Image: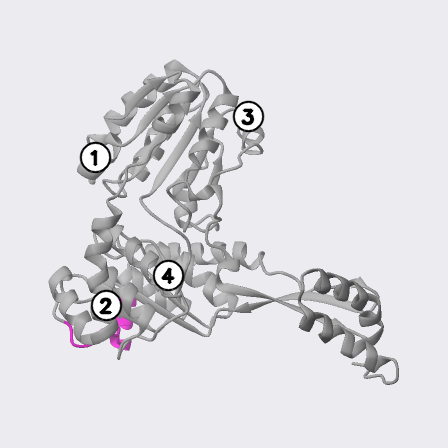
Amino acid sequence: MMKIYRNPEFSQWSELLHRPAADTRALESAVLPILEAVKLRGDAALREYTARFDGVALTDFSVSESEFQAAEESCPKDLKKAIRLAQKNIETFHRSQIEKHEEVETLPGVRCWRRSVPIERVGLYVPGGSAPLYSTLLMLGVPARIAGCSEIVVCTPPQPDGTVHPAILFTAKTLGLSKVFKVGGAQAIAAMAYGTESIPAVYKIFGPGNAYVTAAKQLVARDGVAIDLPAGPSEVAVICDATAQPAFVAADLLSQAEHGTDSQVLLITWDENTLKAVMREVERQLTDLPRRDIAQKALENSKAILVNTPDEALQLSNAYAPEHLIIACADARALAQRVTNAGSVFIGHYSCESAGDYASGTNHTLPTGGYARAYSGVSLDSFVKKITFQHLSPDGLRRLGPVIETMAEAENLSAHRRAVSIRLNYLKTNTIDR
């Protein structure tokens, strides 16, 4: 079960908050040959790896229209209704992120502005093994469509019978995504990065995955293919006080522990009785959890920490920078104002992390491994580029030109200075008013 630490000294925090470390060298040595093979041999390599890793012999990786239709017919009605409602909420939240175009006059005659331009070709990776994450397709496909990406490629592993899980295909069809390919693992990342006969190359790759997928994304990024963010095993920290319901907190901890054996969960509280009650409840709920074995191993990487005060709890959480942070306290809103490092924050006793995973509207593709200190989760901004523009009128150049000349001369960049001077000299006898 989870290790318990009571009132650790600050000097112990660094070791205490250590995450399970993956052997990155071993991962890279396993993934690099796959990337190279797909880069060189395209679909032929994909067929080999799909047969080896997924146990499926495929000649065509594309999902056909008949497969989309069959998925829609077999997907349960209540699940389809739930997916549509989640889609609506995610769309509402992400549409609110559209920036208004504003021009700023920094000096008379000098106007600057910035415009969001969609990334033309994006690839979405959707895990489809023991947990087919159709919710990930919602989280990535919705903002990609709102942003206006002209080509959206989806890769997801095939099931043992060579099909894709119906919920994933129904979600794709609902979002209007038709380019769905039955390819998973590192080989799917390679296909989207370099392109094959069947799968087009993209400019940016999104989506979570296992350690091999994560390593593949980081490796193709070295070749100039952008990725959404550094992502690893799922994690949650829960800060709670005596008002918390132990059953709620235990369920939240287990909801992340069941993701994978390398997941990590943290319980942080300043109330001894709450700590004990939550630990008992975790043990009780674990017994009937279908993914009990996975959660059990994740709990071995996890910790329950008793601190002295709410201030110390927040300092500890900010030092950890969790992917998900739940604040189950009487003054949760006030405490949330002081969060500086977290992927997504869930405030109050009824704001379970599962809400953000599925349907509240926020994006569940978030930085893990402490990257929340510097990275944001996926948003509409992730699917666009921000291009800046400027326009100088003749009067604007007259005002700004001498400043540029002085600065360029100080850096010994005479051609930069000349680009201004030649125009200023021209303006002494001529005018181009545009």
Count of labels in the image: 4
> Quick one: quadrant of the N terminus?
top left
Residue tagged 4: 221
Whether the residues at callouts 4 and 1 have beta carbons within 8 Å, the answer is no
Task: Name the amino acid type tagged 2.
Answer: Glu
Between the C-alphas of marks 1 and 2, the distance is 34 Å
Residue corresponding to mark 3:
331
Specify few, some or many for label 2: CA neighbours under 10 Å numbering under 14, 14-19, or 20 or more: some
Which residue range is magenta in the image?
58-72
Q: Is residue 291 on the magenta stretch?
A: no
Q: Position of residue 155 (x, y in %)?
A: 29, 66
Q: Determine if residue 183 is in view.
A: no
Q: How far apart are the alpha carbons under marks 2 and 4?
A: 14 Å
Q: Amino acid at mark 3?
A: Asp
Q: Determine whether, in the image, residue 427 is placed left or right of residue 120.
A: right
Mark closer to the chain start, 3 or 2: 2
Label 1 neighbour load within 10 Å: few <14, some 14-19, many 20+: some
> Which of the two residues, 61 or 76, is positioned nearer the viewer here?
61
Please state which of residues 232 and 170 is positioned toward the viewer in this rendering. Answer: 232
Residue 44 location, x and y as percent?
17, 75
What percent of the width, then of the height, locates residue 72?
A: 30, 67
